[in-house]
Amino acid sequence: MRNVWLASIALALSAITASVPALTENITAPADIHLRMAHSLHSKSHYGTAANAFAETLKTCSKGKYRVITFPNNQLGSERNVIEGLQAGTIDLAIVSTSTIMDIIPEVGMFDIPFLMHDLTHARNVLDGPVGRNILAKFPSKGLVALAWGEQGFRHLTNNVKPVLTPEDAKGLRIRTPKNSIHIDGFRYIGIDPVPMTLTEAFDAIKKGEIDGQENSLAVILLTQLSQTQKYLSLSGHVYAPALILASEKLYKKLPKIDRTFFDKAGKAASTKMREFVDNVEKNGVEKLRECGIQVAEVDRADFATAMAPVYSEYYKKFDRKIIDAIPFQRNFE
Ligand code: PAF
C-alpha cells in the first residue's frame, strides 16, 4: 500500500516538474526571474558568502527582476555535474574550483602550478590582468561565461604521521589531492604519494587510516574541522587556488545588454567578498586551528619551491612557457 502511495506521489511530482519550463526560457518575464546557483561547500564558507553577495547585488542592480536561489553542499550534484548543467542550461550559475574546469579549458590549470604565485596580491593581479582575462575569454566557446575569478587561497598540507618541515619529511606520505594532474605531478615529484579523490571521500579515508592527510586552503581546513582528524598542519602554501564564478552561456546570451552588466557586477561583488573572506582567514585562521589542537609548522616555502622546480619542465610541455615565465614567483627563489 505504502509503495503504491509513494509511486503516485512520484508520478504527480514528475508531472509537475515536466510542466515547468526550463528556467533559462523565462528570460523575457517582466519580473522575479528565479535562477539557480550551485556550489560544493557550506553556505557559511567562502563560496557561500560569495553566492550570497552575487544574489544580493543582482537583486539590487536589477531592482528585484532576478532572484538567485543558492544550492550549497553539492545539492545539485558534483562540480562536474554542475558544469554540465550550466552547459545544458539546466543550471544557471555556479562557483567552482579550477580542478574540474581544467578538463574543459586546460589553460585554467596553469594557475595550479605549485609556487607560481608569490602571495595573494600577486595572484589577484595576475588573474585580474591580461593573463587571467585572456583565459576567461575562452569560456563562451565551451557553453560557459566566466563572470570573475574567485579565490580559495593558498593550499597547505595536513597529515597524521609527523610534522612536515621540509620536502624530505613529506616523502612517502599518502596525501589526498583533487583529481588535478598539475597537483599530482608536483607532489609525486617530491616523493609524496598523491591519492586523488573528492574531499568528501577524503574525510572517510582519513578516519579509516587509508590516507595520511590532505592539502587545502585554510578556509576549507577550518570549515571542515579537519583539526579533529588531522594532527599536523604545514604552512607550505604550495599552490594558490583560484575559483570561478560562472554563468550558463545559454542564459547569458539571451539577456538584454543592460542585464548582462548586472550579472558582471554581481560576479565582481562575489569575487570581492570571497577575497575578503580569504583575507580574514589569513589573519585569524592559523590561530583558530592552533586553538583547536592542530600542531602548526611554519615551513620555508623556498625549500619546497626549489624541490619542485624541476617539475616545471613538465608544465612547460602542457602550457605556454612564455606565459608561465611572465608570472615570476619562481624567479624570486633563484
Ligand atoms: O579540495 C577540493 O577539492 C576543493 O578545494 C574544494 C574544497 C572542493 C573546493 O572547491
Image (spheres, rainbow, N blue to C red):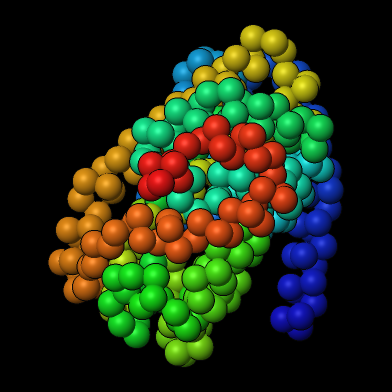
Query: In which quarter of the view is residue 196 placed?
Result: bottom right
Residue drawn at 47 percent across, 83 percent down: 172
Q: From this viewpoint, which residue is outermost toward the top?
A: 258
Residue 200, relative to residue 117: is it above or below?
Answer: below
Side of 18 relative to 55 (left or right): right
**Residue 93 visible in image:** no
Residue drawn at 50 percent across, 76 percent down: 192
Image spot of residue 316 (x, y percent): 66, 48
Residue 39, relative to residue 311: is it above or below?
Answer: above
Residue 324, relative to residue 219: is it above or below?
Answer: above
Say how many tags the image has.
0
Image spot of residue 65 (x, y percent): 59, 20
**Residue 122 visible in image:** yes
Residue drawn at 76 percent across, 57 percent down: 13
Of the 4 image quadrants, the one containing the N terminus is: bottom right
Side of 24 relative to 333 (left or right): right
Side of 230 relative to 136 (left or right): left
Image spot of residue 95 (x, y percent): 56, 43
Query: In which quarter of the view is residue 40 placed?
Result: bottom right
Image spot of residue 209 (x, y percent): 45, 89
Q: Nearer the viewer, residue 135 or 44?
A: 135
Query: In which quarter of the view is residue 206 placed?
Result: bottom left
Residue drawn at 35 percent across, 55 percent down: 302
Q: Nearer the viewer, residue 85 or 326?
A: 326
Side of 62 relative to 276 (left or right): right
